[in-house]
Image (spheres, rainbow, N blue to C red):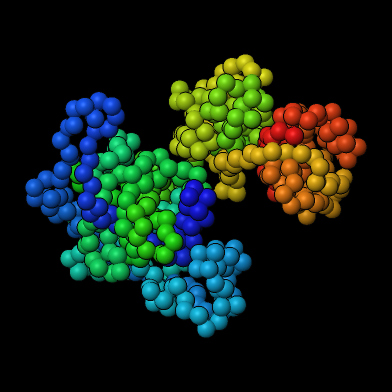
């Protein structure tokens, strides 16, 4: 299920303009655990009159957004290869030029525009929505529940979290106040307001299914609230609110095999959305903290290789030269376990912490290096537009050098692979299907740079170092994949 979830969510957010509407699920919530079995506490129920006061408070501040796109996308047109592949994976049929004559999934919103929702955050006309609602729009039209219409101006966008801010020229507008999403608990009631299928001011109800969801592959930076949301076209950018009528999330994506509601929806947490909104309003862009490292999750084999008691923490797979991390003394192979006093469970948690840290802050960082704990102080920099702060990668599996072919890395090959600087390592040219190498996650084009922390600069080095590996040993391999360093660990 987890792999299918990762595969399906991306296409929906990219092509369906979808987000979450929570529906009544008939939930009867009660305490759990052994004590609950004995005490049998009463079920938690909704107020006798439902959530009418919350609905009255919130609906006036959730708007309908329609756009006129700068480029029409329909059957027979040329699409970017990546987008076409995602569409074909989602719909299970050819799309674009190869799918001529088939019904386009874009037709639900009309051939020239898009439709979604937005939340009025300030009374002078600033509106928070999803980036995919207004992406590539040459016109943005905003309609309030009271039928007033405005031309919207795009203040700023952040595709990395799928958020955007639109401004209308108006005063004294109703607003939805910010809530504290960090206090949300699983099982808590939440309401969603939006415009599914153009049905304005639709209010639906559900519960919080999970918080702090990451590793979804929906956006680059993820902090999602999962709900049993009935998500349909037009709800994107709508408000997810708590029972006090406070904004706790912006509905964004669903897991679906059909394109419609299947009970698993995701909203960008207000904890992430609020600072992004404030940054876009203030500067028109998002300023993120930056360390200049590549990171990945630990698994049990990697933890053992780096002398870590458990698999908690973020493994530093790369350190950019002259970056804040480099200047602070962080090294490749360090495991970051604590950042500014907060435990680091995995790479996604560290990514969130770093990107939310004000630029210029001096932050204490605890790492484990060679089995010993150290504390460093890093001065957080500003993330360059072209740099990814942290790629949360994980690979694991059984590894055997049988089944893999390598060759020396020359300048031309390094250039083709997007590698900079002096070529060093051996490039994987072939991986036998079902071999130990394939199970380990090695792919043609990977550049092997180390085996068991021993440098590999040539095929001769590769043969020498790999010959020292005995059957049953755990092998630690450092590779470079498309310019990003990554550790692999498996047993021969």
Compared across the picture, whether 440 is left or right of 456 comes to left
| Residue farthest left in this picture | 48
Q: In percent of the image, x 48 and y 35: which residue is there?
A: 349
How far across and how far down the image is residue 261, in percent?
35, 60
| Residue farthest bottom in this picture | 101
Q: In percent of the image, x 17 and y 39: which residue is there?
A: 43
On screen, 253 above or below 271?
Answer: below
Compared across the picture, whether 291 is left or right of 174 comes to right
How far across and how far down the image is residue 97, in percent?
59, 78
Quick one: 319 or 269, which is closer to the camera?
269
Q: Can residue 216 be seen in this view?
A: yes
Compared across the picture, whether 331 is left or right of 150 comes to right
Quick one: 491 or 105, which is closer to the camera?
491
Q: Can residue 354 be seen in this view?
A: no
How far across and how far down the image is residue 193, in percent?
25, 56
Name the quadrant containing residue 279.
top left
The image quadrant where one finds the C terminus is: top right
Compared across the picture, whether 415 is left or right of 169 comes to right
């Amino acid at each position: 299920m987890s792999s299918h979830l990762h595969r399906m969510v991306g296409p929906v957010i990219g092509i369906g303009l979808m987000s979450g509407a929570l529906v009544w699920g008939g939930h009867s919530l009660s305490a759990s655990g052994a004590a609950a079995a004995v005490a049998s506490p009463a079920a938690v129920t909704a107020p006798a009159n439902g959530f009418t006061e919350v609905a009255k408070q919130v609906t006036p501040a959730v708007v309908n957004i329609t756009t006129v796109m700068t480029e029409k996308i329909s059957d027979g047109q040329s699409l970017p290869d990546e987008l076409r592949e995602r569409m074909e994976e989602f719909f299970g049929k050819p799309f674009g030029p190869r799918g001529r004559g088939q019904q386009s999934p874009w037709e639900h919103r009309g051939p020239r525009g898009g439709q979604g929702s937005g939340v009025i955050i300030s009374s002078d006309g600033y509106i928070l929505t999803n980036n995919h609602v207004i992406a590539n729009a040459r016109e943005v039209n905003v309609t309030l529940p009271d039928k007033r219409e405005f031309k919207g101006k795009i203040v700023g966008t952040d595709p990395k979290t799928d958020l955007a801010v639109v401004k209308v020229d108006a005063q004294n507008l109703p607003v939805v106040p910010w809530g504290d999403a960090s206090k949300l608990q699983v099982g808590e009631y939440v309401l969603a307001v939006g415009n599914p299928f153009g049905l304005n001011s639709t209010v639906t109800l559900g519960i919080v299914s999970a918080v702090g969801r990451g590793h979804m592959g929906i956006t680059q930076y993820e902090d999602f609230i999962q709900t049993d949301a009935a998500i349909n076209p037009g709800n994107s950018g709508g408000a997810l609110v708590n029972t006090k009528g406070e904004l706790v999330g912006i509905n964004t994506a669903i897991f679906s095999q059909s394109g419609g509601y299947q009970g698993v929806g995701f909203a960008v947490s207000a904890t992430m959305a609020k600072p992004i909104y404030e940054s876009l309003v203030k500067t028109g862009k998002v300023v993120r903290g930056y360390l200049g490292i590549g990171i990945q999750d630990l698994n049990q084999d990697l933890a053992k290789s780096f002398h870590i008691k458990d698999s908690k923490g973020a493994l530093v797979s790369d350190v950019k030269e002259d970056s804040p991390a480099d200047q602070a003394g962080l090294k490749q192979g360090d495991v970051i376990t604590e950042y500014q006093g907060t435990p680091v469970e995995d790479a996604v948690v560290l990514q969130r912490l770093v990107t939310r840290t004000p630029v210029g802050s001096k932050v204490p960082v605890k790492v484990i290096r060679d089995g010993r704990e150290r504390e460093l102080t890093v001065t957080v920099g500003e993330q360059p537009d072209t740099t990814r702060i942290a790629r949360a990668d994980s690979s694991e599996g059984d590894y055997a050098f049988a089944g893999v072919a390598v060759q020396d890395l020359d300048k031309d090959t390094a250039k083709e692979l997007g590698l900079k600087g002096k070529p060093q390592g051996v490039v994987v040219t072939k991986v036998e299907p079902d071999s130990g190498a394939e199970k380990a996650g090695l792919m043609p084009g990977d550049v092997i740079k180390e085996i068991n922390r021993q440098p590999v600069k040539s095929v001769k080095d590769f043969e020498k170092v790999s010959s020292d590996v005995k059957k049953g040993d755990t092998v630690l391999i450092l590779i470079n994949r498309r310019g990003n360093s990554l550790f692999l660990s498996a047993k021969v």
